[in-house]
Each structure stands twice: as C-alpha cells, then as structure tokens.
Amino acid sequence: MYVAVKGGERAIDNAHKLLADARRGDREVAELSLAQIDNQLALAVDRVMCEGSLYDRELASLAIKQARGDLIEAIFLLRAYRTTLPRFGASEPLETGAMDIRRRVSATFKDLPGGQVLGPTFDYTHRLLDHTLAEQGDVEEPATAPAETGRFKSVAELLDGGGLIEGDDPPADEIGDLTREPLSFPANRDLRLQNLARGDEGFLLALGYSTQRGFGRTHPFAGEIRYGSVEVEFFAEDAGFAVPLGSISVTECQMVNQFTGNGTQAPRFTRGYGLVFGQSERKAMAMALVDRSLRARELGEETGSPAQDEEFVLSHSDNVQATGFVEHLKLPHYVDFQSELGLLRKLQVEFHARDGRDETPIQDAAE
Amino acid sequence: MLDITANTPAFDPAYASQAAFRALMECMARPGEIRSLKGIDAPAPFAPATAALIKSLADYETPLWLDATFAAAPKAAEWIRFHTGAPVVGSPAQAAFALIADARTLPDFGLFAQGTSEYPDRSTTVMVQIDAFSGDAVTLKGPGIKAAHRFAAAPLPADFDTRLQVNRALFPRGIDLVFIAGNGIAALPRSIMIEER
Amino acid sequence: MSAPVYNFAYLDEQTKRMIRRAILKAIAIPGYQVPFASREMPMPYGWGTGGVQVTASILGPDDKLKVIDQGSDDTTNAVSIRKFFVKTAGVETTTKTSEATVIQTRHRVPEQALTEDQVLVYQVPIPEPLRFLEPRETETRRMHALSEYGLMHVKLYEDIARHGHIATTYAYPVEVGGRYVMDPSPIPKFDNPKLSDCAALQLFGAGREKRIYAIPPYTHVKSLDFEDHPFEPYRHDAQCELCGAMNSYLDEVITDDAGSRMFVCSDTDFCEGRRAAGHGPVAAGAMETARG
C-alpha cells in the first residue's frame, strides 16, 4: 500500500552530509587551503569575484572550495553573501589610465606610448599538456624589469585627441545599480555595462562571437586591452575629499568599431567597452563587443540580431538567475503535470470517440 | 557559519518596524479598518504612530514632502534626517511619502505623484494626521471590503468625498491615503469607492 | 574575512523597507505587478526566492508559519524553506492550515478556506500572464497600461478551435477586481475559484523576475472564459484513497510497473485532518451513491 511521502527533512539532512563528504573526497588526500585556491586557481577566483560582484579573494576562494570547483555555484554563494552587506555608496570612477600595468596590448598600433607589455598570458603558449606539472617542482623565477611609472593614455584617448573616435560619455549625476533598482527597458548604458560585467562569461562570449559571424557586425578592433591594479577611491562626506580604499586588479578592453557620421557630424570610430575584476581578457573583450552591439539603436544602426536586442541580452545574461530557473525544473511539478495529464486524457477520449473507435488507449482508473 | 539566531538580541529594532508595517499592511488590505500600533515619541507635530510608520518605511530612497505645519517644525525635519536619512523635497510631486499635520489644508491630490499608466506604483502615499476616527461616516466599497464598510475621520477638507471620487476615476493611477490619530491608523488605498453620504 | 552576521529573517532592514513599500503598492493596485529590487537569496532563483523575500518582509516573531509545495508540507523544497525561517527568524512553524498566520505556497491553495487572520504568500516563476504571447516587457507593460487583453482571449480561443477545450490547465489567467489580468502562479485551475472573495490577503512574489503583486481580501477574481466555453475547474473524477475526499485536488500516484494508479489528496494537512476525524475511502458501491 502506498504511503504518502514523508521524511523529507531527514532526507535533506542526509543529502547535505553526503555532499560535505563528497566535497572533501578521499581523506588521505591533503585538503585544499584557501591560499592555494587564491594563488594557484587565481583565474577562477577572478571570475567568481567578477560575476559574483564582490571583490574579495578570500571569500571567493572559500566559495570555490565550498562549491567543489563549480564556479557558477561559487558565484551564487558570493552573490547571496554580498546582498546582505550594507551599502555605503559608489566609489569614484576608476582611473584606469593610471593603472599599475602588468599587461597591455594593442592590436591597432604597432607601438604606442607605454609600449606593448605582454605580461602573464596564455597567448602564444602551445597548448600541450605539461606533464611536469603533474609532479610538484620548482618554478623558475621570472625575468622582471622596473615598472614604468606614469599615466599611459589609452588608445581611445589617443584617437580622441585627433577627433577620430567618439569621446567618453559625459559623467552621469547618478550611476544606476540594478541590484538596488529593478531593471526597466530601455536601460541606460551604465546599467547595461553593470549587467554585462555581472553576466555569464560563456553567454557573452557566444553573443560577442555571433556579432563577428555576421549577426550584427560591428567591425571591431581590439584598440587596447590592459590588465593591472588600480586604486579605488571613495568620496567620504565627513572628510570632504576622496579617500583611497585600496587597489584592485582589473582587465579593461577598449574596442574600436566601425565609424558613424552624418551630414552634421564628421565620421569617426565608435567604441565598445569592457571592464572586469581580475584577469579575464575573454570576458572583457566579449563584454566590449556586446556593449557596442547594444548601442545599435542609439547609433541609428539596423537592429534585429540577438546581440543587439537589449531585452534579450540583459534578461538572460545572469547565470545565477538562469541556473536557478533551469534547475527549478527538478522541483516537483506533479500538481501541474497531472492537470495536463487530465486534459490530455480527456482530449484523447474525445479524439477516439470522434474517430468512431470506442477503445481508448489509456484507461483512466477513475472511470 | 549561518548561526543567525545567536546574533539576534532579545529585542530587535527589526521587530518594531515589522509590527508597524504589518499594521499598515492590514489597513491597506482592509480599507477603513482601524488598527493600533506602538507609536514612538518624536518632535511635534508628529503623532506617535506617524513616527513609527515613517521610521519603518522611509529611508534614503524615499523623498518626503512636509506640509506647512511639519515644515515649520525644524526639529521634526531633523528627526526625519537622523532616523531615516530620507531627503525632504520641496515638491509634493517628487515625494514617495507626504506628511500632513493639518488635514484641513490637505493639498489637492493632483499635486502629488499619481504614477503613470505603465507604472502606477510611482505615486505618493499621503499620511494624514487627524484628531479622531469619528464624525460623519462615509460608506466604502471595493477590494478588501466584504460588503461595505463605514469610515469616519475628522477633520477633513469639505470636498473630501469628491476628491476621493476623482482619485478613483484615475485608477490604476492615483494616491493612497493613510490616516493617523494617536496610535490608531487606517488606510484608503486608491482602489476604494465611496457611496454618496 | 569575518564571520557573517545576519538580521532577523535574513534580509537587512533596508531591503525589507523596500519590499514592504512594494507590498503596500501591490495591495492598493490589485493585480498590478510592482517592480521591486529583488535580492539574491541563499536559495536559487526559481526555487521560491520571491515568496521567501515577501515572507521575510512580513514575518514577525509572533507569526506561525506553514510552508507547502504541491500542497504538501513535507516535499523537499517546502522543508528547506521552512528550515530557513526557523533558522533565520526563529518563528514557530506548523503544518496545520488552521493554525498558521502566514502560509507560503508553491503551486497550490490549501483546501481549507482561509481566514481574515491569515496571509497566503505565493511563489511565482513567471508573473507576466502575457509573457508567452509577447516576450517583450516593454510590450506587455503597454498592454497592461491600456487594458489591452485581446491577445489573451485569442490564445484561449485558439485552444478551443484546436482541441475543443481551453488547453490551459494551470497558471490559468484571471482578471482581478475588473482591471488587471494576472497570473495566479502555476496552481491548478481547480484552485482558481479559491482566489476570489478570499478572506485572507494573498501576496505573490517573483524573485527572478523582480515583481510583487497582490489580491486584497474579498476581491473579485474571475478566471478568463467565454460565454459558450465557461471556465471549468478540473479534478480527477475519483476519491482520495486515504481519506475518501471527493472534493479535494488529487495527486495521481503510479504504484507499479504495470501502470496501476491511485489518487490521494494533494493537500496533506487536509487529508490528515480528515483521516483523524475518522474518514476513509468509501467502498466502490457506496461511491456511486455518494456521487449521486
């Protein structure tokens, strides 16, 4: 005899114990420390901080450990923690021109003030599995050079000097925050950029890629990509001036795109912008491509491709939202499913009755 | 790590806000019904319940507009700034909440934000302090009311019934009214309809 | 890194104020979806974050909370959400509908009529009833503003043309207080009549979609239909095999590989209450009589 399902509470507790056990794995194997994750899985930490919208390497490392390396789960953990934090205000705009540069490349000029700085990059590595890494071993000290100090103009600034590219947007009085105000459409560029910075790397990558394959072409050039640390400043009302809070690592991408112009305005290049926490050129570049595509309406271009569709892009870029809703299909839906089943049986009965056949394929128990 | 109850003190300001909100929620859901809540002391002309409601609902995101009586009491504005951080604005059309100490001089409803047809929620909630829930009663109907409900408040502007009818005609746009007498509160959301007296 | 400290009922006070303001507007404009700055919650989107935020914002220390999913207090997600509030708010919980002051639900309305002292909080996945007819928010918002609901009727009528019936069996659209067309959340349409003139306040929270809406008590809620195809609630034509109920919504349970089926009440508290009162399944012969 059927017994109504009971014991959900104990089952959940046990499942969570199993999860903790699986997370730890073989107890003979040394447990990961947060410092190990922070140092040796640094790019994973970067991604979790960026899409988690919280710059804290230690918490991000903890989230990765707790999530068993599932980065979207780790992003979710960090977001859920972030949302409980009190909010004091917005920082001053980051001065990326004054970045302490670790890497800086431009695809539009062979050389430029400040030079091309390759820095730590996978580019030009041969993607051959390195079996020596399977064992612990010493790593050679890298070659270093004294850092060039000073402020290096970005390619966009250099072009702007010659009037060849559109300038920066005028500074806004108030910067939107989609975590404090629900997004409404059309959204301004500040909110779009915030959405993209938090957006899923894979989703943005695919959208950016689609613009290169003709679904809303923007003729992009990687004007400049730079990665390094920048100081964050906060205007303190009581002090009356901006005080430094510390520095963070960011990757910035300035994409230079196809020009616009009309009878009243000289033709000039347009821009797409990407900025992410930590080192992720893939994400920063994809973000810049999509940012530019989302400006199609503003620039009077033809729209209709997925990456140009603001509602489509902004409503589906968040992997925490997407994961939750896709995975919620695991939750019981039997109440709704059986309503459908009931209707379907009724329709089938009617169908077969009309067909002149009296047998029904499914015998309803209640009949 | 998630031991939250351990961090909850025996008395929490969160409880006071919750109680005040819940009373107002019930009032909004059952127009014209009077509930009492635990008021808090605040400088004149604040009624204790007004202070409790404002403290539980207003913050830096909600511009407040003050009527002449409130505006003439600098200590009241100071209390608002200190306890809520809400900006006080000069135009009622920008206000999320309006505080009215003198119900007889209640400004025309059209001066407040009435929302748009796409976002009717972008409207002002007007909190009106009155002497008592008594006087000439009006019959209310509409969402939240089982059949009909009698509601009285004094003092009120002479053309109050007409104003409510005009407000209702704007639905879903319009303003929502909260009445306060001492520790007692009642609400007339924009959805109510009134019968001729 | 410092150990996190959380507020009563998890949400910080600023967030609660924001949600409370949205709830007040939702009550004042029955059926209108109020946008709110939904927060990331420690459970996934689509798993009740909207309902949880609404519940967390209204809940007080004297409340008694009941949480159900598919009508049952013991399904995993209901257990998880109930435990969340026990942990973060320390409130008393109950499985008895009659004892609860706040009931959070997913996909069902309790069988027992609710009272004026109760609040029913629905978890909503897609709050926009027009979303599957028009994917764009800018468009659906305009349609609501103009009460332009013809598209919905066309969709329902196309069902009738194709199948002879309206093919919507759950999340069946309703009109609230003669104005807004509203999604009642994915409750079976069997539950739709319970929304109308209900003594309790009904609140709807959609976390991922960032919307809150409400049906005040004693508000007329009409399921959309046509004169020649009136709205019909559906239930399996059977009795509950545990308590014999003939008027409750039933879950179908498959009992063996041959596809044998049985029916039991979806509302576990209702079923337990009936069994405690001595009700049980009625023999087949007697059932015909009972059906009349």
Image (spheres, coloured by chain):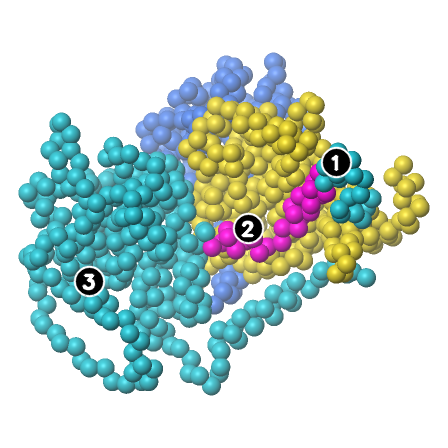
Residue at horizontal 28%, vertical 58%?
Answer: A282
- The reply to whether residue C227 is in sight is yes
Is disc 2 in the same subunit as disc 1?
no
Residue lying at 86% horizontally and 51% vertically, measured from the top left: C281
The residue drawn where x is 44% and y is 21% is B109
Question: What label sits on residue B121 in the rendered view?
Answer: none
* Tag 1 residue: A355
Mainly helix, strand or loop, the magenta region? Answer: helix
> Is B91 situated left or right of A11 in this image?
left
Determine whether B19 is above or below B178 in the image: below
Chain letter for cyan? A
Q: Is residue A338 magenta?
A: yes
As for residue A319 lying within the magenta part, the answer is no
> Which image quadrant for residue A63?
bottom left
Q: Is residue A271 left or right of residue B51?
A: left
Of residue A278 and residue A258, the one placed in the foreground of this image is A258
Position of A265 with respect to A327 (left or right) is: left
* Element at label 3: strand
| Placement of A133 over or under B77, stated as above or below | below
Chain appearing in blue on the rendered image: B
Kindly tell me whether residue A95 is visible in this rendering: no
Please state the extent of the stretch shown in magenta in the rendering.
Answer: A323-347
**Badge 3: chain ID:** A
Q: Which residue is disc 3 drawn over? A: A228
Given this view, does label 2 or label 1 mark the residue nearer the observer? Answer: 1
